[in-house]
Structure formats: structure tokens, C-alpha cells
Amino acid sequence: MENSIPAHSASRSALLAGQIKRDWWWVTISLIVFTAALSLLRFELSLERLDFTFYDFQASNAFEYHRPKNTVLIIIDDKSINEVGYWPWRRSEYAALIERLHLAKAVGLDIIFHDKNPFYSADDVQLAYAMEAHGRVVLPTAISADQSRIHKPLNILLESARSTGFINAYPDKDGVVRRAHLFFSLPEEPLHLHFTLAMLLAGGDEGILKQSLQHPLGSTRLIPFLGPPGHFESYAFSDVIQGNIPPSVFKDRYVLVGAWSSGLGDFYPTPLSSAKQTSMSGVEILANQLENTILNNWIRTGSPLINVFFSIIPVLFICFILRHLTPRRAILSTCLVLIIIFIGNWFFLHILSLWIPPTAGLIGTVLAYPIWYWRSQETVLRFINNEISQMREQDPELRQALAGRTAPNTLPARLSHLHKAIELLREAQQRKEETLRFISHDMRSPQNSILALVKMQRQNELTLSLDQLLTHVENYASTTLELVDDFMDLARVEAMELEMEPMYLNDLLVEICDDAWVRAQAKQITVVFDEPEQGVWVNVAPSLFKRALSNLIDNAIKYSSNQTQVTCLVKNKENHVQIVIQDQGWGIPKVDLPYIFQPFKRAHATKTDGPKGSGLGLAFVHAVILRHFGEIRVNSKENVGTRFIIQLPVIPEPGSKHH
């Protein structure tokens, strides 16, 4: 028995470990497939909005921003409005501006001159002449929403411009400008360039232009904004035309002219401006695109397969961690992996200029912890339920002890249930071992004494008369029968069906005390029964209950010194009655009190002059009281005495109106 339980546990533990391993593979593969699907279907599942949020946060947290050197802005601000005059200005003002920018590499006017001014028609000719004289001026166009038409400036101006390009901004679904569209293929024009590419054409940087058109990223790029709004070198329109800014400032630089004043021009939120709830002017967005085109500084986006790869890597890593770490360390590791994803995402964006959408990987990583522990907990719960079921099938006593108990739903409750089953199983095993020890030692000892006595008598080693020999044999045989009777009585009371009947407790106790009088007189012990004035009725099995109380009084007499007193009290409570049996005897040692009702446990067993016994008497009493739906407690102090307190439910007197 001792060897079979560990072997059984080892095999069951191996089965549990194997099932958990299979669950781990199931969870890992499921999470990888789920994360890959999220990555591939992020547009359809609207996960792109979350990716936008992460992108804006990462983009706005660069260590440093580069100061643009190739591009300078001339802005139409409030100061210029006050000094030049009411808007819109005459086109002669722009002609004057262009004349002062003769050293610029190219000049881009972020203003669409699509209609004539009837009051100053000569101004269009003056502006066209200034543009033609400069030779490197770019005018904007606008593409219709359905991309079927191109809105161009006046023909007289269009013929004088070096090139034209569209200035349309295409925000993402959340209204934030993050991307640049550098060219389109339109019905009117097979290759219509963006305004920034038209600036490169006008400035003579055809190599950069060709490289941009043949770039593997295609026409759409993520813009690495070089700084927050106001980051570019800017000059007021009025200061330039008034000669306050020397022309050498603009030498060999791209100059963009656009509206900056409140109420004029177009403003858009960007990843950098959205963090401060301020928008960036359209001309500054053009400047960012132009500067990044010159530097070939674009943020690359990963292919779908690359995005899937980088999304499942953290999920695979966290699944590996979850299998080998405790729950506390696993949750800390999960948080650490999430932090690493953020840091790695920032590193890819700012150091490698590569954007990997993190949302799919984050969701897969966050879900790994609860899914794994849900799955492993379910496996453990099933294992525990199977263990309890097998224990019930293998051990009848355990099945009876757990009868009526249903398996709880939570893991702690089921573990407690399993622990209770194991405890009951150990108690049953301990009882079996104690029974074997009782049979092999206590019951064999009198028989061995009889055999030894007979052998010595035959070999003339003893000089006992026949009557003396028979007396000894009779005593040993009586001891054996007494042990057998005690053992069978305990086994019977734990298993048998009790036939209950109403009994008048007062008369029953009087009878028990009277029966003990003869045994008490031998030691000059007084047995006192303090009978209550009001009678008490209880529902008991008469013979068993009477024997249990007799055992307690007999023990009180056996373990008391001469000329002491044994007292029996009855205390009638509201719904129950207490029977108190108290002596003035040896008392029970403190170390023995927790085990005094267990079979084969005896106090004072080592005393040579102590009473003999099997250690089954108090176990019998305890079993009888429990079968009567009562409880028994003991208080004792060495050399002072012992008090047993029995509590039983009371019943109405038979024949009364409450019966």
C-alpha cells in the first residue's frame, strides 16, 4: 500500500504534464494563427486606428529633430497682412517678391491663381513676366476628389511657370496627415507630379527626381516630420518685399511661399502637432515633404509578411515564458515583453526608418497570459475531478465519506476538495495500518502468553497447579475476547443503521450511575448525578448510547485515585442538552488531547500501574455521539481531572402537544 500510492501519483502526474504540454502547443499555435490573422486583416478589422495612435506617439518622441537646411519658408502671416493690406493681395505683390528671390534655387507659390482679377488685369501680366524672368517658379494645381480633373492656374501664369504640381493633402481615416503621395496617373496626365517633385524639376535636381520616381516604396510614403510646427526657417512676406531680408539668405535654397495667418490657408493635424493639439500649415507640410525628398529620408513600411513575422515573434516568446515560469513571474514577464515591443517599435521607426504596426503583436501578447492560464486551469480542474472520482472508486470508505459532496467549480475549491479526499484516504490508510498493528500486536500478545505458559508448563519450568494454569489461560483469553469485542463494536457502530427511539434522559443517567456504583465502591469513589428539575427527552439508540456513557463513567473511575468524586451533570439549553461527566483523576496529558478520540490512542499507556485497555473505548464513544448528531469535547488538566461535555439535540416529550 505504501509503495502503490507514490507510483500511482507519479503516473498520474506524468499524464497531467503531458496534457499540459499538449495544451501549450494548442494555445501557442492558436495565438500565432490569431495574431497573424490580425496583422493581415488589420485594415478590415479597423486595427489601423490603434496603429495610428502608436505611430503618432512614437513619431512625437524622437530624441532630436534635424534643422532643415535646403528649404526656407516665406509666410503670409498676420504681420504681413497688416503691412501689405487686406487679403487678397494684388498679384503685383507676388511679382515683387519673385524679383527679390532671384538667387533661390526654386520658388514655389502655394497659392492657386485660378481666376482673373478684373480690377487689376495688368497684374497677371506683371506676375507672368516676373515668373518667366526668374525661370524657376512652380505653381500648384489641385486634383478633384474623384481624380478625374486637374484644376490649374490661369493660362498666362501656367505658360510662365517652370513646372506645376498638385498640393492635395490626403489625411488618414482619423484626419491626420501622415503620408505623402508623390505622383498620380490621371486621365489628363499619365504622370502628374506632386508639388515637391515639381520643385526639384525646377531646381535642376533631376537625379533626385528620377530616384524618387523609381523608388521601391512607390508613390505613397510615410513622412518623417522633421519637427513640430514652426520648425522650418521662416520669414514674413512683408519683410522680404520691403528689403529687410537680404537676397543672399535664399541663395541656392528652395523657397516655399504660403499662407500662415489665422483664417488663411489650410491647416492639418500631424503626428507631431496632434500631441499638442495644434495643426500644421499646408505650406510647412509641403516643406517637410520637399526636405525629405531631397534627403531621401522616408519611413519604410514593412510588407505583410514582415509585419506578420514581427507580430508573432513576441507572442511565441511569451508563450515559451508562460510554460516555464510561475504565474507571478509570468505576468511580470508579459509586462516586460510589452515594454520591449514599444521600445523595439521606437527603435525601428527612428533608427531604421521602418514602421512595423504593433497592434496585432500587442493584442496577441496580452491575450497569451489569460488564455494560457485559463486552458491550464481547466486541465488541472479536469485532472483533479478525475483523481477524486478514481479515489472514490478505489476506496469504499472514501466514497462513503465524500457521499453527497459535489465537485466545486473553482480551482481553489477543487484543490480543497482534493486535499480533503487525500486527507480522508490517508486517514483510512492510517486506520488500516493501526488495525494491522492492533491485530499483530495487541491481539497476538495474549495468545502468545497462553502458548508460552503452556510450553513452560509442559517443560516443567513452572510449578503451577492445574487450577492456577487454567486461571491464567482464562485471563489471557478474556483479554483477547475483550479486544475483539471492542474492535467489532467500533466497526459496527460506524457502519450499522441505528434504530432510534425517544428516551427520558434523566432515568437513563440514573440507571448508568447505579450500574457504576459497585465499581466505584471498590475504590471508595462517589458517583454523583445532579438531576435537573425539568426532564429531558432525547432520540437515541438505547443500548449503544447507554454503553457510550457507561464507558465515560468507567474511565472516570479507572483513571481516578481512591476517595475522589465523579460527577454527572445535565444542562438543558434552548434546543439541545449538555451532559457533563467530570472526575478528579489523573487528567490527560496536553500532548495526547488532540488524539484522544482516535482509535488505538491511549493516555497513560506507558504507566506500569495504569489500567489496561485497547485504546478503542473513547473512539467508540466519539463514533456513537456523532451518529446521534451530537458532538463531544474534552477539557483536562494533569493531576486535577478531566471533563467530557456531550451535546445532543432534544426532542419534545412524547404525547405532548408539541410532539
Image: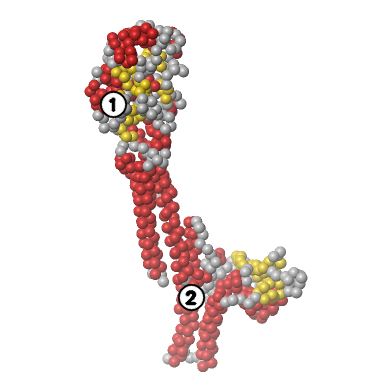
**Which image quadrant for residue 283?**
top left
- How many marks on residues? 2
Q: Is residue 225 left or right of residue 206?
A: right
Q: Mark 1 points at which residue?
A: 191
Mark 1 or 2, closer to the camera: 1
Are there few (<14), some (14-19), or many (20+) residues within 10 Å of tag 2?
some
Amino acid of disc 1: Leu
Amino acid of disc 2: Thr
Looking at the image, is mark 1 or mark 2 earlier in the sequence?
1
Are there few (<14), some (14-19), or many (20+) residues within 10 Å of tag 1?
few
Q: Name the residue under label 2.
A: 435
* Image quarter in which the C terminus is found: bottom right
Residue 623, horizontal then vertical, whole percent: 58, 72
Q: Closer to the camera, 106 or 384?
A: 106
* Image quarter in which the N terminus is found: bottom left
Q: Is residue 481 left or right of residue 298?
A: right
- Label 1 and label 2: CA atoms lie apart by 100 Å
Callout 2: SS: helix
Is any atom of residue 601 visible in this view?
Answer: no
Residue 643, horizontal then vertical, whole percent: 63, 67
User: Residue at the bottom extreme?
Assistant: 466
**Which image quadrant for residue 300?**
top left
Callout 1: SS: loop
Q: Closer to the camera, 220 or 501?
A: 220
